[in-house]
C-alpha cells in the first residue's frame, strides 16, 4: 500500500529516467528498469528501484555530481531505496562473463 503523499515506485522510476536523460543529454542511450518492479515482485517499503543507464562515452564531473544529487535528493515514493548503475554502451555490448571478472 502506498502511504499518504508517496509516489508510486513506477512514477519515481519514470521521473528519474527523464531527469537522467536531461542531465546526460545526447549521450544517454537508454535507462532500463530492472529487478522486482517490472517483474511484479515489488514490495512497497521493502523493495528498491533498480535502474541501469547506458551512455555513449563518459560523463563530465558536473554530470556525475548532478546525477549523485538527483539520486540522493529523489523522493523514493513507495520504494525502500534507489539503485542506479551507469555503464558505457561499449561495456553494455560486451559485458563481463560474470560480475567482477574481465574478459581476456
Image (cartoon, rainbow, N blue to C red):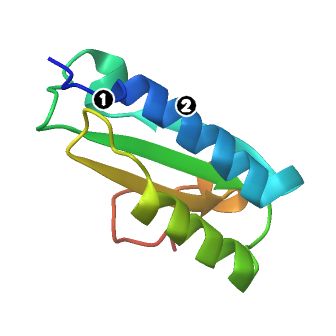
Front residue (pair 3, 98):
3
Query: Residue 19 in the image: x percent, y percent?
Result: 66, 47
Whether residue 16 is situated above or below residue 36 in the rendered picture? below
- Identify the residue at the far right of this view: 26
> Tag 1's secondary structure?
loop
Task: Give the residue at x 25% y 38%.
Answer: 79
Task: Give the residue at x 11% y 38%.
Answer: 46
Name which quarter of the figure residue 27 lies in: bottom right
Query: Residue 92 in the image: x percent, y percent?
Result: 61, 52
Is residue 83 visible to the viewer in this orientation of the structure? yes
Number of the front mark, 1 or 2: 1
Lower position in the chain sequence, tag 1 or tag 2: 1
Whether residue 82 is situated above or below residue 6 in the rendered picture? below
Tell me the residue that label 2 is attached to. 14
Is residue 96 visible to the viewer in this orientation of the structure? no
Tell me the residue that label 1 is attached to. 5
Name which quarter of the figure residue 64 lies in: bottom right
Front residue (pair 2, 55):
2
Instruction: Classify residue 3 as left or right of residue 7.
Output: left
Amino acid at each position: 500500500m502506498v502511504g499518504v503523499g508517496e509516489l508510486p515506485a513506477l512514477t519515481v522510476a519514470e521521473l528519474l529516467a527523464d531527469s537522467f536523460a536531461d542531465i546526460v543529454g545526447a549521450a544517454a542511450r537508454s535507462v532500463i528498469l530492472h529487478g522486482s518492479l517490472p517483474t511484479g515482485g515489488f514490495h512497497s517499503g521493502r523493495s528498491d528501484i533498480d535502474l541501469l543507464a547506458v551512455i555513449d562515452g563518459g560523463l563530465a564531473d558536473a554530470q556525475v555530481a548532478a546525477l549523485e544529487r538527483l539520486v540522493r535528493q529523489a523522493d523514493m515514493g513507495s520504494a525502500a531505496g534507489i539503485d542506479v548503475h551507469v555503464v558505457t554502451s561499449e561495456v553494455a555490448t560486451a559485458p563481463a562473463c560474470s560480475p567482477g571478472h574481465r574478459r581476456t
